[in-house]
Amino acid sequence: MLEAGNSAELHCEAIADPRLEVHYKWTINGRIINESSIFNILPDRLRINSARGRHSGVVDCAAVTDVDVKLASMKLVVKDVPAHPVVEPAVCTERKAVIRWRAANEHGDQIKKYTVEMHTDFRKNVWERVVDELNVDKEHFEADVTLTPWVNYTFRVIAENSHGRSDLNAALDEEDVMQTVSCQTRPSFPYSNPSGVRAEGTEADNLVVYWTPMDKYFWNAPNLQYLVRYKLNEPHSAWTEFLVEDSLANHTIIREQPTFREFLVQVRAVNAIGPSILEPEIIKGYSGEDIPAAPPANFRIEKLVNFSSVNFAWELIEFWRDLLPARKYRILVPPTQSEKLVTTLSANSNYTVVIRTKNRKHASEPSPEIHLTTPEGCEFVSDECMTCGPLLQRSDFSLLPLFY
């Protein structure tokens, strides 16, 4: 027994009548062995160089004279990765391929599993595992593989043992050729639509629809395009639709739309056969925002609490859509609040304060200024009260409620 890549010598010597000349003939599994880079035939022995699993088998040495033939045999086992499985022609339909193969020679090391792999013309030589067969105690195997339309498929079957995968033979042994089988499916309608669809405005009068372009494997036919449909999410609004012909596009800009209105949007795949068989999801989005028309009215000091705190108040902004989804506000005052206690002021200081209305992209003009002077007080440093003298400062302190 040999490990793959090792060398060995097999000795064969016959004793014959001195008057007879002896010739030696070597065979392996019944095939005559000829001189090669692997086999060196010497007068009384056979040398095997860098043996591989395919050299396993019954080796016969025949001592031949003019009057007689004597035969000696031995079994040679070279432990190696498995041989390539024998794959039968694939049976292909529009949605399924049936891959059949016969058990591979394990080369002295038990096979643990078979793996069916495939690649397509869209990603040549990038093999993808599609089926693992762990029940290896049989002679004939079969696996079903789901297909999609308009694709050229190539399949192979790999056997694996503790020495490795059978496809390693392609690099180690040029004479061990791996079989592949192919399937080609006809075009059909798309079975899916683009993912990642969303809509939002980037300017006050537009709506931008975004999506993730579809991988060519899922086109199902040539000439993939995207059918974009949109309408205002309001009673009696009608759908508008158009085609984006660039299959690699990931967004489109819809111009001349009303400011900050809710829209319903769909993006559907369309190929040379027709539109997708799957109804696309309807998503909601908003057109762009504009500068708020005015700051909050009646901005005032509600109460001067102490040297560091003052309570401001104002009138709520009337908002025309009460059913908007809740939003996260990144600054001090939410739009439902009409006063704010600020507690971070300095003692004996002059302040100028304004308030603005703000959305995600814009802020209104400031309100009329409020001027205030905080009373004298104490600043605390390491728990010691420090005497404060007059401190004059002017701060543009803006309270910005956000409206989304």
Image (spheres, rainbow, N blue to C red):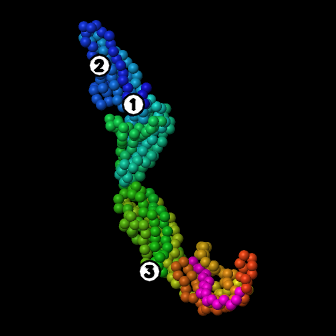
Quadrant of the frame with the C terminus: bottom right
Residues shaded magenta: 388-404
- Circle 1 Cα neighbour tier, 10 Å, few/some/many (<14 / 14–19 / ≥20): few
The residue at which mark 3 appears reads as 256
Residue 69 coordinates in the image, percent (x, y) = 30, 12
The residue positioned 34% from the left and 17% from the top of the image is 12
Give the quarter of the image for residue 250. bottom left
The residue at which mark 1 appears reads as 6
Element at label 3: loop
Q: Which of marks 3 and 2 is in front?
A: 2
Q: Is residue 33 left or right of residue 260?
A: left
- Circle 2 Cα neighbour tier, 10 Å, few/some/many (<14 / 14–19 / ≥20): few
Determine the CA span between mark 1 and mark 2: 22 Å
Predominant SS of the magenta segment = loop
Mark seen at residue 265: none
The residue lying toward the viewer, choosing from 290 and 239, is 290
The residue positioned 60% from the left and 73% from the top of the image is 328
Element at label 1: loop
Q: What residue type is labelled 3?
A: Glu
- Circle 3 Cα neighbour tier, 10 Å, few/some/many (<14 / 14–19 / ≥20): few
- Vertical comparison of 301 with 44: above or below: below
Residue 72 coordinates in the image, percent (x, y) = 36, 16
The residue at which mark 2 appears reads as 43
Give the quarter of the image for residue 389. bottom right
Element at label 2: loop
